[in-house]
Amino acid sequence: MTKTTIQPAGSAPAIGPYSPAVRVGDLLFSSGQIGIDPVTSQIIAGGIRAETERVLQNLILILKHEGLTMSHVVKTTVFMTNLAEFAAMNEVYGGHFPKDPPARTTVQVAALPRGAAVEIEVIAHY
């Protein structure tokens, strides 16, 4: 199978040696996205809700580049530094998956890059 790296224009730059996403066959695997504003390259201000929304918008940019939408997402993994903020993250997250949400795993981690509060990665099906 051929592996194709995905580098969408207008997305936040990677902060390490990785691709924003990789396509293999009919699956797209995103790297974890944090709430970086693609224009300023800074974590978005405003707390967990604003940060979660920016993360999801960053994922939408990757999906859109490939002609996909959030409805193509089959699995997500959510990393949070504070599960006490789960309900707020979940409310924003749920707004992007109003029908037939994907499978999901959520875990609390000690820290995320650039002091982010939330990171989300997706697997989507073409």
Image (cartoon, rainbow, N blue to C red):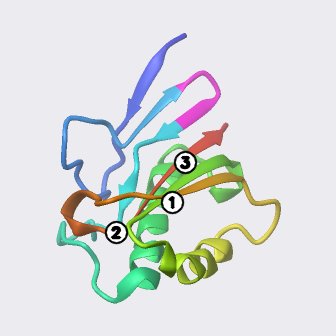
Nearer to me, 104 or 39 = 104
- Near mark 3 (Cα within 10 A), the count class, few <14, some 14-19 or many ≥20, is many
Please tell me which residue is depicted at 49% across the width and 66% down the height of the picture.
Answer: 56
In the displayed image of the protein, which residue is found farthest to the top? 1
Nearer to me, 50 or 39 = 50
Tell me if residue 2 comes above or below residue 87 in the rendering: above
Q: Quadrant of the C terminus?
A: top right
First-in-chain label (1 vs 3)? 1
Residue 54 in the image: x percent, y percent?
Answer: 41, 72
Nearer to me, 20 or 84 = 84
Q: Which mark is residue 33?
A: none
- Real-space Cα distance between discs 3 and 2? 15 Å
User: How many dots with numbers?
Assistant: 3
First-in-chain label (2 vs 1)? 2
Q: Which residue is mark 3?
A: 122
Q: Which residue is mark 1?
A: 60
Per the picture, the main secondary structure of the magenta-coloured stretch is strand
Query: Which amino acid does the dot numbered 2 rest on?
Result: Gly
Nearer to me, 112 or 102 = 112
